[in-house]
Amino acid sequence: MTVCATEMTTTAPLTITTDGAYAARLAGEGEARYPERWTLGGPEPYAVPLPLAQPEEADSEVLPLADGRVLIHRRVADRHAFALLYPSGTYTGPRAAGSGAGPRTGELGLGGIDAEEGLRVRLLPPCPDGSAAYALAVGDEETTVWQVAGHASDGPRRAAVLPGRCSGGVWLDRAGRLLSLDREQDGRVKAVAVDLTRGGVVTPLLQIAEDSDDRLLMAAPDSGLLLIRSDAPGEPRLGWGVLGSARPVRFPECLRLEDAHPFAVQPGQVLMPETCGVALRVGGAGLALWRPADRYVFRLGAPAGWLGTGLWTPEGRLRLPYSTPEVPCGTVGLSQPAAPPPPVHVDPPPKPAARPVPLREAPLG
């Protein structure tokens, strides 16, 4: 759920809430796009289309909330507008072509942000508390974190203002208080932590080398596991570290994968970062699984129609959403393969005991 002069990221077409109960995407094609909410918390996944009278633009963004509503971000004339969508009864009016029969869609406007020249606005990943939602507005010289849902005031509220251009966006805790951003300043990119409950106080997070670009890709608050991309080893490499640890970041050889992006980390592994399962999207449609304790990566075939994202359960089960003409809304479960035993090193056999040599066979020279 994730740019100019900083980390080039790819985003999956489906965004999942932190608790895995709901997901949302912009479904349809061409000029017939409409928001779609997936319910994943029940025994069987199902999708609910949320079409309005007007189809959505291709650059609109959607974000699911824990109560089942879907936040949408649209560019409307000279503003970035935000609204909450929800099913509210039988849909009888016009709808986007291809959306199919579905409920009437209710819409609650949340205000907007002026679209200043050069300003780029995008939604941040779902907040861990499930009710708040944030957007990142990147200007030429500063970046603003806006809270666009889950607060009492009317319209978006400034939560933090940072000098420099920021990208990324990773939550560091379960309360939605600490947010990591990759900030570009003086020609270098460094991940920083932003405390949204203290007016946006900024503290350094990654300082691997003085002249390196250090970005945070994912974090597991329970274990402290951090997934990092840095050029400190001499080239951009995937690495891992532990939040608050004095041990250095490690860059395993097995993570030297071309075009690899971690998209899910196993939760619930309290103080055990080495045991966390990590899922990576490789080359756009490839799938790989890895654990810090392992020295290799499991390459697996992705299911047909995979939407490029997924969610780990605390028990180590990876759920991958997919959509095909036969199954428009489905998930498939995978388990982390068991690590093979380490190679056994057999000591060389002992030399045979020397036998007495008969005198007639004894060497004489």
Image (cartoon, rainbow, N blue to C red):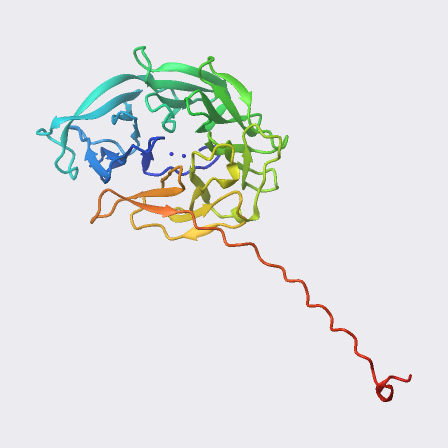
Residue 243 or residue 96, whichever sits in front: 243
Q: At x 14% / y 34%, what residue is drawn?
A: 102
Position of the N terminus, as image quadrant, is top left
Residue 31 shows up from this direction:
no
Determine whether, in the image, residue 97 is placed left or right of residue 143: left
Q: Residue furthest right?
A: 365
Question: Is any part of residue 241 visible from this angle?
Answer: yes
Which residue is pictured at 44% across the width and 40% down the height?
A: 262
In this picture, residue 7 sits left or right of residue 113: right
In the displayed structure, 228 sits above or below 254; it is above
Q: Position of residue 85 (x, y in %)?
A: 22, 25
* Residue ranking furthest to the bottom: 360
89 lies above or below 314: above
What is the x, y in percent for residue 291? 49, 44
Query: In the rendered view of the protein, which quadrant contains the C terminus?
Result: bottom right
Residue 105 rendering spot, x and y as whole percentages:
17, 26
| Quarter-of-image position of residue 53 | top left
Q: Which residue sits furthest top?
A: 153
Left or right of 70 on screen, residue 176: right
Residue 96 position within the rendered picture, expressed as x and y whole percent measured from the top left = 16, 34
With respect to residue 146, does 285 lie above or below?
Answer: below
